[in-house]
Amino acid sequence: MSEIALQVNFGLNIALLLMLVAIGLAIARTRSLLAAILLMGMYSLASAVWLIVMDAADVAFTEAVVGAGISTVVLLGAILLVRAGPVRHNWRMTIAPAVLVLGVGGLLVYAVTGLPEFGDPASPTNAHVGRSYLIQTSDEIGVPNVVTAVLASYRGFDTLGETVVVFAAGIGVALMLGFGPRSNLPRAPAATGDHHVVLRVTAKLLIPLIALFAFYVQFHGDLGAGGGFQAGVILAVAPILHALVFGLRGTIAALPVRAVRSVATMGVLLYSGVGVVCMINGGGFLDYDYLFPPSVEAMIPPGLMGEPYHAHHWGQHFGIFFIELGVLLTVAATMVTIFYGFAGRAAEEPGAST
């Protein structure tokens, strides 16, 4: 990289860092819940841009969609459930938390000074673990995207745990909030003389494009940025947008609560089932090389997924495909479940007890 490019990259990093600091201070100072939520959405967008600059496109996908998109919608729905305004606290009550935050922050800054320089090829990460992944992925996994190989194969058990955590979050929201009285009401009749026709037509155009882009991110994960987590979050945006524009009851009529919960469960079972099949065929849990018996693998055409003379690991390819599909189903259904839980609640009446 040329000297000018390095200077431009450094200047862009500093500008984004200052932007994040400014937004963080604004969030801390504001007393409006609505303003705080919108500022947090801006913070997530700025973080996503910074992650793109740092060549972490996979994480930027998730940060933009979850942080700036779904989290903002869910938080806005949460503040609509209560009618109380912000509570003013005595400033003396903030002294102890402020000292604790400054102390922990100082320790973190001190710890950063002991880390190797950014991009140092001699650092343990780049010289040992990362280098091993870069060298061995092509021969052991056969997937062009090293990030996908690490998350879905080398660390497949960790990714299963993350998927179960997402699923558990959806169960927790369903147990605490249910799906609200609004979810049990009959579908609202079509409005006559609707003055939101432009919004509805635009949503009808965007929803299929959002779903199509989600599937692109899903199936492009082997080659570039993407995968089940990112695709699942993007896919969940489609029904959430439908609910915001056409109403929650119409969305639940199209995607019933029972079906959404079943899809979330099916994703975890599909992921775990791949590991069980590998064990039945004589391998370890999630050892995709044992996904197919040798007789079945010999029946797969050699040129099915690329060069006919390139050594393909069919178990790895299809194992990653199936577990990424399970992640997609669980993440998308869980996000929709969480949205149903918040959006289905009725707002508190003034003076209602909490």
Image (cartoon, rainbow, N blue to C red):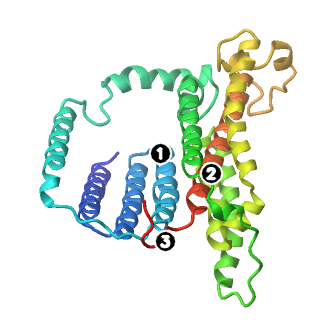
Q: CA distance from mark 3 to mark 1?
A: 40 Å
Residue 187 occupies quadrant: bottom right
The residue at the point 65 percent across, 20 percent down is 286
The residue at the point 65 percent across, 65 percent down is 182
Location of the N terminus (image quadrant): top left
Check residue 349 in the rendering and tell me which mark sits there, or answer none. 3
Check residue 239 in the rendering and tell me which mark sits there, or answer none. none
Location of the C terminus (image quadrant): bottom left
Within 10 angstroms of label 2, few (less than 14), some, or many (20 or more) residues? many
Check residue 59 in the rendering and tell me which mark sits there, or answer none. 1
Mark sitting earlier along the chain (3/2): 2
The residue at the point 15 percent across, 45 percent down is 102
Residue 184 occupies quadrant: bottom right
Residue nearest the viewer, comparing 14 with 83: 83
How many numbered marks have been drawn onto this rendered protein structure?
A: 3
Residue nearest the viewer, comparing 304 with 233: 233
Q: CA distance from mark 3 to mark 2?
A: 25 Å
Q: Is residue 290 above or below residue 12?
A: above
Residue 100 occupies quadrant: top left
Mark sitting earlier along the chain (3/1): 1
